[in-house]
Amino acid sequence: MKAMILAAGLGTRLRPLTDDRPKALVEVAGRTMLETTLTRLRDFGIREVIVNVHHFADMVVDFLKANNSFGMRIEISREDELLDTGGGLKKAGWFFLKDYNSAEQPFILHNVDVISTIDLGRMVKFHGEHQALATLAVQDRETSRYLLFGDHNQLCGRRAGRDGNPELVRSSERTRALAFSGIHVISPRLLDIITEAGTFSIISTYLRLAAQGERILAFRADEYSWRDLGRPENVAQAIQDLERS
């Protein structure tokens, strides 16, 4: 099984921590976000990873070389201009399609700036059992942007905040607004049906495909801890959490 780590963002919300480094190299309790994410994937059994880079890209490359890629095979996908989550995945898609075995297996897409105890094994099993095109780890918590899921946990729309107007792409008798964790399990078939180009969010692709009847499913991860590391105060809180654990 392979994985991609989304690490190309400017880390604007993390300033001043990202004034002189990419967000992937911001440290949390003595380890960079990138090392933490790679270690989590390696512990799950993944040995092949592609990382997209843009902001201070050479620093990421040098960091991986200095640490012997943490015993993994790591490819770099350089973005001369930011492509967002969808464009970044599309550019790196060759990594998952270049040999038969990987072209048949699902892969993990993981934000570099989240830390969690979400059970990747359970998530991958859920993905396979439900024959999903993409499975998204979600929780019932506050967020500025909700995904809406309807019957059989299928994606049916999105909504900004608690009071925003819902954008529905498929009908459902009832919907549940849930917060996305930044962790996906994806079947490689998705890469062949991404029609968007340039810079775009993978969520936009998911919504288009959900409207066409594709199975974009919610994996409920409420029982697991999760923290966004996108702001300095969140990093400080994560350090406190780790010190207490």
Image (cartoon, helix red, strand yellow):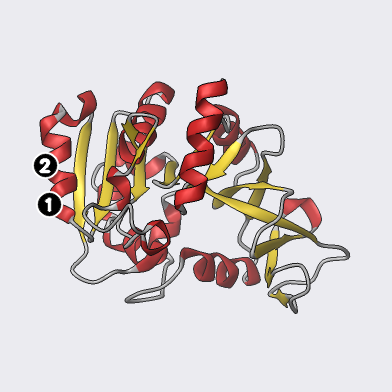
Which residue appears at 76% of the width and 67% of the height?
162
Where residue 45 appears, x then y in whole percent?
38, 23
Which element type, helix, strand or loop, lies under badge 1? helix
Q: Are marks 1 and 2 in contact (CB under 8 Å)?
A: yes
Residue name at image x 21 percent, y 55 percent: 20
Residue 124: quarter of image? top right
Q: Which residue is mark 1?
A: 58
Secondary element at image label 2:
helix
Q: Label 1 is placed on what type of residue? A: Asp
Separation of disc 1 and disc 2 at Cα? 6 Å
Residue, disc 2: 62
Please tell me how crowded label 1 is: few (under 14), some (14-19), or many (20+) other residues with Cα within 10 Å.
few
Q: Quadrant of the N terminus?
A: top left
* Residue 67 as seen in the image, left or right of residue 46: left
Q: Out of 179 and 98, give the one closest to the viewer.
A: 179
Image x and y of residue 74, in percent: 21, 38
Identify whether 195 is placed above or below 91. Answer: below
Residue 170, which numbered label? none
Measuring 66% from the left and 54% from the top, which residue is drawn there? 179
The answer to whether residue 97 is left or right of residue 177 is: left
**Residue 166, horizontal then vertical, whole percent:** 74, 75
Q: Residue 68 versus residue 243: which sits nearer the camera?
A: 243
Q: Compare residues 225 and 85 and report the one nearer the observer.
A: 225
